[in-house]
Image (tube, rainbow, N blue to C red):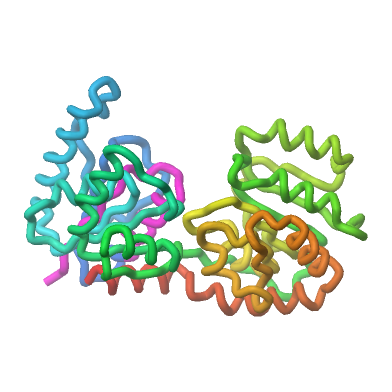
Amino acid sequence: MKKKICLVSHTLQMGGMERVMAGYANYLAKNNKFEVTLILLLKVQKFYDIDDRVTIIEPNFEYNKKNRILYLIKIIFWLRKEIKNTRAQSVLSFGEYWNSLMLVSTSGLKISKYISDRSKPTIEWKGFNKIIREITYKNATGFIAQTKLAAKMIEEKYKITNTLVTGNPIRIIEFDDNDERENIIISVGRLIEYKQFNKLISIFSRLSNSQNWKLMILGDGPLLDDLQVQIKELNLNDKVILCGAIKNVDDYLIKSKIFAFTSYYEGFPNALAEGMMAGCSCISFDCISGPSDIIENKKNGFLIPLNDEEEFLSKLQLLVDNPSIIEDFRIQGQKSIQKYTEEIVHKKMMEFIN
């Protein structure tokens, strides 16, 4: 008899959390041991494709912006009914706001309840959100943490002792080791404040002997105009390229030599992990949280104290001046990043909730 598993997600719109949930649902569906139901809390357009063997359930009523409290009560009772109808042995939900909703909905039900926060673990919750998390999180059967820091904080705050630490599943990026890479330092992410691309551009502008190098930033966002002004003021128009939103990110990664990451915080930095998977030598600020779970300093990359621009510049200069270090980091990075492949991470999650 197949084991019944229920997954709960806010939506399947484009996003890191949604991508992981969609991939996990498809992974379970391909395993003949499971009957998978995916419950979505909002009925909106889906970005990710779901295996036909996954049963998708959506509410038959629309989100009510004018009366959120009434809608919240309605969705709690609806979710409880749908989870009971699945007769699942275990349920897994993603998302800081939605985990508590799932735990409230399943109160008193004989079902294993697993949750996972998917953003930075140092958020200071206040008011109702703080109270409801303190009440509900202690009732979780287990917690899936993206980083060691996230697991530690959850264990301390909510006394959850059953935790699994595993980063996001990273897809395999194919490339030929013999292909010639260009003198490109690349970074990927939304052009928003906490990504700190302004600092990366400033650091790049101070590199010595960098005339043969380019900095390419893939992504769009509200700081586009500010960054363009900065590039112009530093006279780097032909050296720093803001590429915008790019669909074929892999094509850029596999022709670049260095992946530079300057975020102030992360949940788990997919972009950094994908840069390493694509064979780039990686350098990153040691932000909260994630880079320290990916980079072992001086072994498979450089991990720089948060916002120490002088140290970042020094190590980036070292990479630019030493092709042998770039090659060594590429080789070691390719070995270490394999622990985050989709197959390995999904299998860990499957075993944990079973």
Q: Visible in this render: residue 252?
A: no
In this picture, is 266 found above or below 303?
Answer: above
Q: Position of residue 217 (x, y in %)?
A: 70, 48
**Image quarter of residue 208:** bottom right
Q: Position of residue 301 (x, y in %)?
A: 67, 71
In this picture, is 68 found above or below 304?
Answer: above
- Magenta region, residue range: 1-27
Q: Position of residue 203 (x, y in %)?
A: 78, 52
**Image quarter of residue 34:** bottom left
Q: Position of residue 124 (x, y in %)?
A: 40, 46
Q: Visible in this render: residue 118?
A: yes
In this picture, is 297 found above or below 261?
Answer: below
Q: Is residue 225 left or right of residue 296?
A: right
Q: Is residue 343 left or right of residue 138?
A: right
Name which residue lies at 38% across and 65% down.
151
Residue situated furthest top in the rendering: 66
Name which residue lies at 69% across and 75% down.
329
Q: Between residues 184 and 136, which one lies in front from this camera angle?
A: 136
